[in-house]
Amino acid sequence: MTAAPRAILRTLRAAAAAAAALWVAGAAQAQLNLGVPEELKGIDIIENLNGSLPLDTRFTDDEGKEVALGDYFTGKRPVLLQIGFNKCPMLCNLVLNGVFDGLKGVEWIPGEEFEVLSLSIDPTEGAGLAKAKKESYLAEFDRPGASRGIHFLTGAETMSRAVADTVGFTYRKQDNGDYAHAAAIFLITPDGRISRYMYGTKFEPKDLRMALLEASEGRIGTTLDRFILWCHIYDPNARGYVLQARRVMSIGGLVTVLALAGGLAMFWRADLRKKKNDGALAATN
């Protein structure tokens, strides 16, 4: 073998070795990135849009009264649902903090335009803890009249599990008694169907407003609100509502057509008026 082919062969072998090393490194990094702690395996949100909540499930509210889930779905107002547990040391608090921080920027009042439900998955929690949790958020939220539209529910594991399963909220109890779960809230229609999933621990006021408007199916908000919603679509990647280019373009096209029609009408009216004036002038001569 001559020197030139040997050099080429060495170059090819070096390139192959480098590619193999990169592949191994990439695979190792992928395994590292995809590694999920044992306690979080199977913890997820499985979306079930338009699924109907089990409205016959029964709970205890923060005043100690027995209630049915269906009591909050009378066909009048949408419901913002959060699932977690009141003794949660971190994530549930972050989600609820994000909800109430976002709602501060929405002028609607719970109990009038919408309802807020916080459902505990811990069957050992009772009305006393639920009431204390509610009062702490009411004090921070500071919205007159909001107490009648904010509800913290507790109850048997079979009942809360039925609701969680319907919305696809999977969770697992840990050895220390806490629950591993994901961070999300659920927007429910006035008749108890799942309208929207929103993820994370921070919720912008405009996104909460649009989500509630969407879930209300036109029962709340103004005509302008509904028009703005029509121009937007929820983007899970952006975790918020974004403009729909196609609908905005269609509006622009309609405005253009109307402007042209208006311009032509004015031109024809002016032309007709000129002809009438010319005819009247000719008649006098």
Image: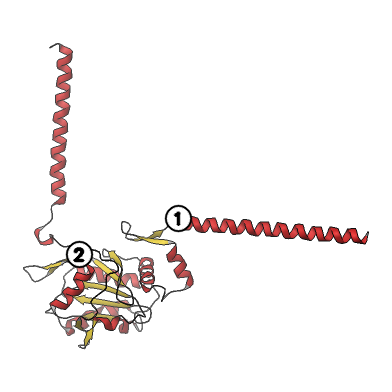
50 or 110: nearer the viewer: 50
Residue 231 appearing in the image: yes
Residue 22 pos. (x, y %): 16, 36
Residue 85 appearing in the image: no
What numbered label is drawn on residue 182?
A: 2
Along the horizontal axis of the image, is 181 left or right of 264?
left
Which residue position holds label 1? 246
Residue type at the position of mark 2: Ala
Q: Do the CB atoms of the residues marked 1 and 2 lie less than 8 Å apart?
A: no
Q: Is residue 126 above or below residue 196?
A: below
Which type of secondary structure does the marked residue at label 1 adopt? helix
| Mark 1 or 2: the one toward you | 1
Along the horizontal axis of the image, is 26 left or right of 96?
left
Quadrant that contains the N terminus:
top left
Along the horizontal axis of the image, is 196 left or right of 10?
right
Which type of secondary structure does the marked residue at label 2 adopt? loop
Question: Badge 1, how many Cα within 10 Å: few under 14, some, many 20+?
Answer: few
- Residue located 19% across and 70% down the image: 165
Quadrant that contains the C terminus:
bottom right
**Quadrant of residue 123 in the image?**
bottom left
**Quadrant of residue 60 in the image?**
bottom left
Residue 158 pos. (x, y %): 14, 77
**Quadrant of residue 20 in the image?**
top left
Residue type at the position of mark 1: Arg
- Residue located 16% across and 49% down the image: 33
Distance from the alpha carbon under mark 1 to that under mark 2: 33 Å
How does the figure colour the protein chain or chains? Answer: secondary structure
Of labels 1 and 2, earlier in sequence is 2
Residue 198 pos. (x, y %): 29, 65
Question: Badge 2, how many Cα within 10 Å: few under 14, some, many 20+?
Answer: many
What numbered label is drawn on residue 84?
A: none
